[in-house]
Image (cartoon, rainbow, N blue to C red):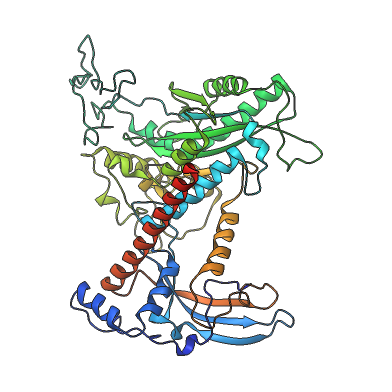
Amino acid sequence: MTAGLATLPPGADSAPGARPVTPHQPATDAASTAAARVDSPGYHYWLSHVLAAGGCSRPVRLAGHLHTLDPATGTVASSRSTETLPDGVIYTPCGDRRASVCPACAETYRADTYHLVRAGLVGGKGTPDTVAAHPCVFVTFTAPSFGPVHTRVIDRRTGRVKPCRMRRRITRCPHGRVLACPQRHPEGAPCLGRPLCSECYDYERHVIWNGWAGELWRRTTIAVTRTLRRDHGPHVRLSFAKVAEYQARGVVHFHALIRLDGLDPADPDTVIPPPAGLSAADLDQAISRAAAQTTFCTPPHPQRPDGWRIAWGDQLDIRPVNHAGELTDTAVAGYLAKYATKSTEATGHVSRRITSETIGGYADHQTHAGTLISACWELGANPHDVGKLDGTGRPFHPEANRPLTPQRAEWSATYGRLRRWAHMLGFGGHFATKSRRYSTTRKALKAARRHWRRSHHHRPAGFDTAEHTDEETTLVVNTLSYAGIGYRTTGDEWLALAAAAQAREQRRTAKEETTTTRLAS
């Protein structure tokens, strides 16, 4: 088997069009560079080379050498340089899970999440099929209220949009603003999630809750397990898959599939059915009790010596998963996979990590997201650095490399994280997580996809696939370094993304035809 980032076919050094035609020449526009690339003799070889990145919008370019080793002796049998490849680099996907950043990589992440979640519901991919009979519920945990905001709620009975905040008695806040809104907001309205009174809204508690939401989830799962073991014996265990989603107001809430398993003390790694008599209703009761009782306070802060109280909101939705009903395994897996590729888009804010040099462009108190970012930055300021100067007589900067004293280490592990994750409005957790024994792993899915690609990818004439997938014949060690990000020209980007989109459309059509044929038969 060939291990590494790329597999070079024999004769790659002399492949036609191995060196680019246009990347190192000044291009007048994207159309001209695309036309020059298509007219070049090595276009198809270049296209097959860049498609290894899966249509990534901003692939990482790597340059260096690839050494083929003899597995028996460990000696270098041959070496090749990426200079012999098109553009002189290897293109690899960026791997970003956010659809707003890279749709192609996000689609791969979504598909992996779908298979990972569904395998934990019906089995397969190393998970026993018996899990389909285990009690399982779909739970939505929400955050508490930090102040009234504009909302859009659809009446389940009539299907109509309800008034935003209709009140019989019109009241005003201490700042004189009316705390009511009779409008029926359309989907995507800019006001959704914005507070009725920004001065009354508790922005500090909002970002603190985001920062400690992951810890609240951890404590809740522990509480559910303890409740079940106290009421039904020690041989029960929770398995879950969870995704985080941003509400329009900028706070995260969690969607989770929670499955009840048995525990074999002699072999704790196996997944077995729970004790007889346990049902989804017992799991529902344990989760409801744990969500209501789990609460804690954050560490002391200069602005709040007693810390902030962290607890779930009043809205808790628990529904059993019915493989034959409305809440099927495919519907739930698709729902979780969809939100695994989302980020802060719902709040109207999208950015990369914020630093002391860029905070001024984001901490805008005139906007809801800007005020949240400002709250993260202010609460995350290290009190041990306030008023201090560095060796040059200038104030300390949060990103500067300084000795990590115990006080600084403690602060970095708690409130200091708010600055690091200010671009995520304080939330620094993973957007898609699972327990260890819920189902397969992303690593296993990536390995299976890599093996399939090596077995089915188009190779030049004379290339022996079996020879390059035999684990005992070939071992490739790469010594590659970062050479840049993105395609060399806009024309190259057009061609690569168009070819990748066409390939995805062909796969989608083939999948629909296969499904239609299966249903017809």
Is the residue 341 above or below the residue 85 in the image? above
Is the residue 379 above or below the residue 285 in the image? below
Is the residue 434 above or below the residue 497 in the image? above
Q: In this rendering, would 316 be left or right of 137?
A: left
Residue extending farthest to the bottom is 14
Residue extending farthest to the front is 521
Q: Residue at x 54, y 42 (%)?
A: 117
Instruction: Residue 495: give x, y in percent of width and height.
Output: 30, 70
Q: In which quarter of the image is residue 226?
A: top right
Looking at the rendered structure, the number of numbered marks drawn on it comes to: 0
Q: In this rendering, would 368 be left or right of 331?
A: left
Whether residue 300 can be seen here: no
Q: Which residue is drawn at 23% across and 16% down?
A: 166
Instruction: Residue 174: give x, y in percent of width and height.
Output: 22, 19
Q: Quadrant of residue 19?
A: bottom left
- Residue nearest the viewer, comparing 235 with 219: 235
Quarter placement of the N terminus: bottom right
- Residue nearest the viewer, comparing 347 with 283: 283
Instruction: Residue 290: give x, y in percent of width and height.
Output: 57, 23
- Residue nearest the viewer, comparing 82 with 222: 82
Q: In this rendering, would 3 be left or right of 375?
A: right
Q: Which residue is drawn at 35% across and 27% down?
A: 146
- Residue nearest the viewer, comparing 303 with 25: 25
Residue extending farthest to the top is 168
Q: Which residue is drawn at 47% across and 34% down?
A: 255
Instruction: Residue 96: give x, y in percent of width and height.
Output: 42, 56
Whether residue 43 can be seen here: yes
